[in-house]
Image: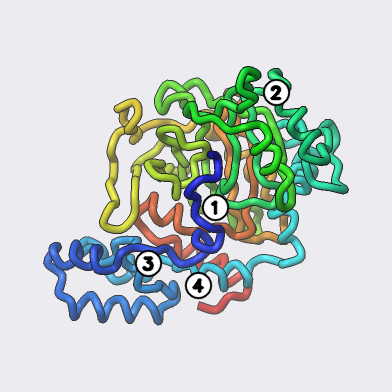
Amino acid sequence: MANAALPTPGLLNGIPEVSIPDNLQVALSSGRKMSAILREVASLRRGTGRLAPSEYFYYRLWDPALTSDQKRAFVGKQAQHRMHVACNDRHWYQTAADKILFHTIMAGAELPVPAVMAITQAGRSLRGAVNLSGEKAMAAFLRHPTIYPLFAKPAAGKYSLNVISADAYDPASDELVLLGGARQAVLTTAQMLAAGAGYVLQPRLRPDAEIAAKFRPRLCSVRLLVFIRPNGPQIHRAVAKIATGDNPADNYWRPGNMLGAIDLSSGRIRGVVRGTGAQTRRDEPHPDTGLPVIGFGIPHWCKLCELAREAAAIFPGIRTQSWDVALTDQGPVFLEVNFGGDLNLAQLAEGRGVLDDEYRAHLGECGFNI
């Protein structure tokens, strides 16, 4: 089933959970003393980054190789929320959160976004897309073989929860063949599409040829942390989100997915990570292909950055933005912008905190006192 064993939005929004006893054991095995670790946890909890004890271990901040200043550059979820509130105008929130509205804005600006075949939210319209009303109409739509491969996402969703990635329709069993070979009944899928705030249905994007050769034919994207500064949009960090196995999306919480730290000047991946805390593994090859990830150049990097700066300027009320840009066979395609967004992806990929001089300057310009 597409939505089996998924974490809740609240869990993904909240402070990361790790086993503190297990991680503490690893920290102690590195030669650190318990008293020193406890003092450090308390100090970072009170610091600008407001790191929870679990975040201390999530980021492996017990590592003796890290200096005190490097540890204080990490930002926890609680501080992240306060920073985003200070930087972003709440009246702009829906432009990022509502995927139908976001698509309308981006398409109107003639920026690349996925085509939309249908929406299932009552009372809404989108040029070029049909509005499916009722489970019967949705089931009939899903039985058209020409709409596949298909990707469907909740119109108000986050973290790729409850997405549907289907390869084909099997009329013999009246089922969808999902990515990876699992099957799901059309009627069950229609019920999903009718639930909540509705869905957006689009043709599944195809990955860039270089991505497919390196990482299998799985769509990957780039996460850009962008600041709206007085002199214009500034890209602060960039991370490659690399899907593995049969995961229907490249979100890092899905088991096995990887993050690559991208060098902003060259567009090449200079470090890669899997897992968190005691399970962190760095600079491994891609698990499906065995090919190295480090050194891979992001396709159309200069064009991607140019388009991102253009797109960022359309949302001036969101002064801290996190963009997801798909790396497709048609070039960069914008998937979404986040209202601030999680800072953990950049921190995990880089192995260093985001709170450097540039971020501090941005926060100061937004009126956030450190």
User: Helix, strand or loop at disc 1?
Assistant: strand
- Say which residue label 3 marks: 55
Image x and y of residue 358, in percent: 50, 62
Label 1: few (<14), some (14–19) or many (≥20) C-alpha neighbours in 10 Å: many
The residue where tag 4 is placed is: 78
Please say if 149 is above or below 103.
above
Disc 3, SS: helix
Circle 2: residue type: Ile
Please tell me which residue lies in front, 141 or 278.
141
| Residue that numbered label 2 is attached to | 147
- Dot 4 surroundings within 10 Å: few (below 14), some, or many (20 or more)? some
Q: Is residue 106 left or right of residue 171?
A: right
| Coloration mode | rainbow
Whether residue 112 is visible, yes or no, is no
The residue tagged 1 is 225
Along the viewing direction, whichever of 262 and 348 lies nearer the viewer: 348
